[in-house]
Structures are given as structure tokens and as C-alpha cells.
């Protein structure tokens, strides 16, 4: 595997975070699979390992660096019991790059799970006269108060409209609704899949990011983990770009998943009123 950490200027003595992901599945028809479990390409890595086996035999893994440093791993798997094992010891990253004009244009438009064009009446009604940081804070607070967090309640095809009507969801639903409201008010917004030390129950986590004053700011409407502890995995328009496991062809029966994320220096304090940049 590549070592993206060699290009970082993060302090060598900074506390590390330990992350793991174990995914099990049964391939019932030869399949092409795409995984997004590795930390992003701009994360300073102390150590890292990834293995994918089918029937106990290692399969060839192709790494593809995608949008915003997302590291995708593609495998062509024969039939059998598949096991993915990933672990990494990482350090805090350097300051995030500035928001580009291309990103502003891409992330202000509607997408598959974030139909912001269908919120153009509702969003201005809910947040009249707000802009900038005040708007970003208000959207995050509104989504937090409006939705109930219920593990396992939503489906993989649920969009922001489904979440709005249901009034409940999991982290990706909170993030989708947040992204959609922000876009409907003209703020570029995107989804980030992350490892989240302090998250209970532990799992992959999804948060929104909003473009403000040239930087991407985290908006986690669940408030289930300190934002400063998050470790980026994947970035994109919505869950279609950030899913940790995608079946491109073939047939697969999905099995248990275990995720851990531990901040070795302890969890940072969380002040919801202050912006945090991943």
C-alpha cells in the first residue's frame, strides 16, 4: 500500500489515532467490489495494513486515489467467504487545502441523495435572512433537533426527502439532510465518511462539510463524536461517493462489520459554537 503520510508536515510528536475495519461477506457469484475504508491520502500514517482474502486466499487489490484524496480499493473476487482486515495508526493532518472554484460549483448542485433543488422553498422558509456562519450553525442545529437518531432505521436508498418525511435516521441521513439544506441556501456542501473516536455505538460515521471563507468546515448534526477527533476516509457529493462497500458486479451477501477508532491522546473537547476543519 502507498504511504500518503510521507507528504505531510504534521508534527511527528502529535498523538496518534488507531483505527480498524473488519468486513465479512460471502461472494455467491464472482464479483467486482470497491472498498473505501483506508484513511484519506492526505492523512499522515505511522503504520497501515490492508488484507483482503476469499476462502483464505489473498486477492489482488488495486488502489485508486479519487476525489479529495479518497483511496478506493478495487478487487475482483471469486466465489467464497470474503474477509477484509484494515488497520492504521495515524497522526493529525496538516491544514486543509482551500476550497477551489471547481469544488464550489460541484458541491452546490443537487445529487442523488441530496435533492437540494426540491428544497428551494422549504430552506428559505426555515432560515430566512441567514447567511455565512450563522446559516451553517442554524442548519446544523435544526437538523439535530428535527431528526431522531435510531440505529438501523433507514435504508441504503433513502434520500434527504425520505429522511425529512420520516423525521429519523442514522448519521448518513443527518448528513444528507444537512448538506441538502445548505445547498438549497446557496452554500456548497459535501459528505465526508470518517473514523470517529468517541462514537457510540462504534461504526463508520458520516458528517457534512460546508464551504465557508475558503475552507471546508465540519457540520455534524448528530453531535455524537468530537469533530476534532475525526479521521477522513472518503469525500463526495453524498453516500453514492463515500460508501465503504460497493458491489460493482456479481452477487454478494453482506456479513458482519466491526469498526474501531481510538484517540491515543484522549478525546478533544467539543464546542459546537466553534468551527472545526477536518
Image (tube, rainbow, N blue to C red):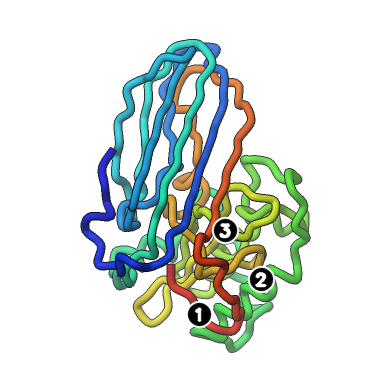
Circle 2 — which element?
A: helix
Viewport quadrant of the N terminus: top left
Q: Is residue 164 visible?
A: yes
Circle 1 — which element?
A: loop
Given residues 239 and 197, the one toward you in this image is: 197
CA distance for labels 2 and 3: 34 Å
For image coordinates 26% across by 47% down, the residue present is: 3
1 or 3: mark nearer the eye: 3
Of all residues, the one furthest to the bottom in this rendering is: 129
Viewport quadrant of the C terminus: bottom left
**What is the number of the mark on residue 197?**
3
Find residue 184 and report its image quarter: bottom right
Determine which residue is flagged by label 2: 122
Query: Where 258 falls versus 222 (above or below)?
Result: above
CA distance for labels 2 and 1: 25 Å
For image coordinates 61% across by 47% down, the residue present is: 203
Given residues 11 and 271, the one toward you in this image is: 11
Pointer 3 local density, CA inside 10 Å: few below 14, some 14–19, many at least 20: many
Of callouts 2 and 1, the N-terminal one: 2
For image coordinates 46% across by 16% down, the residue present is: 54
Of callouts 1 and 3, the N-terminal one: 3
Q: Residue 35's x, y, as percent?
A: 44, 36
Determine which residue is flagged by label 1: 275
In this rendering, the count of numbered labels is 3
Amino acid at each position: 500500500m502507498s504511504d500518503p503520510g510521507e507528504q505531510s508536515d504534521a508534527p511527528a510528536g502529535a498523538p496518534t489515532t488507531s483505527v480498524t475495519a473488519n468486513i465479512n461477506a460471502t461472494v455467491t457469484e464472482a464479483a467486482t467490489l470497491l472498498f473505501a475504508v483506508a484513511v484519506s491520502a492526505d492523512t499522515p500514517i505511522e503504520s497501515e495494513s490492508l488484507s483482503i482474502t476469499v476462502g483464505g486466499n489473498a486477492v489482488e487489490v488495486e488502489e485508486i486515489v479519487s476525489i479529495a484524496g479518497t483511496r478506493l480499493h478495487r478487487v475482483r473476487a471469486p466465489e467464497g467467504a470474503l474477509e477484509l482486515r484494515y488497520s492504521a495508526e495515524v497522526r493529525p493532518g496538516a491544514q486543509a487545502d482551500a476550497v477551489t472554484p471547481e469544488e464550489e460549483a460541484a458541491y452546490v448542485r443537487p445529487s442523488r441523495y441530496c435533492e437540494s433543488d426540491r428544497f428551494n422553498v422549504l430552506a428559505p422558509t426555515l432560515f430566512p435572512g441567514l447567511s455565512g456562519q450563522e446559516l451553517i450553525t442554524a442548519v446544523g442545529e435544526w437538523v439535530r433537533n428535527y431528526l431522531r437518531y435510531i440505529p438501523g432505521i433507514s435504508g441504503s436508498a433513502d434520500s434527504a426527502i425520505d429522511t425529512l418525511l420520516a423525521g429519523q435516521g442514522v448519521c448518513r441521513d443527518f448528513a444528507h439532510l444537512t448538506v441538502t439544506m445548505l445547498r438549497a441556501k446557496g452554500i456548497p456542501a459535501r459528505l465526508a465518511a470518517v473514523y470517529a473516536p468517541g462514537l457510540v455505538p462504534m461504526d463508520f460515521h458520516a458528517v457534512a462539510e460546508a464551504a465557508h471563507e475558503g475552507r471546508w468546515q465540519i457540520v455534524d448534526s448528530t453531535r455524537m463524536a468530537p469533530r476534532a477527533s475525526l479521521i477522513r476516509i472518503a469525500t463526495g457529493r453524498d453516500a453514492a461517493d463515500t460508501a465503504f462497500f460497493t458491489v460493482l458486479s456479481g452477487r454478494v451477501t453482506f456479513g458482519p462489520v466491526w469498526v474501531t477508532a481510538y484517540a491515543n491522546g484522549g478525546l478533544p473537547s467539543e464546542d459546537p459554537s466553534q468551527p472545526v476543519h477536518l
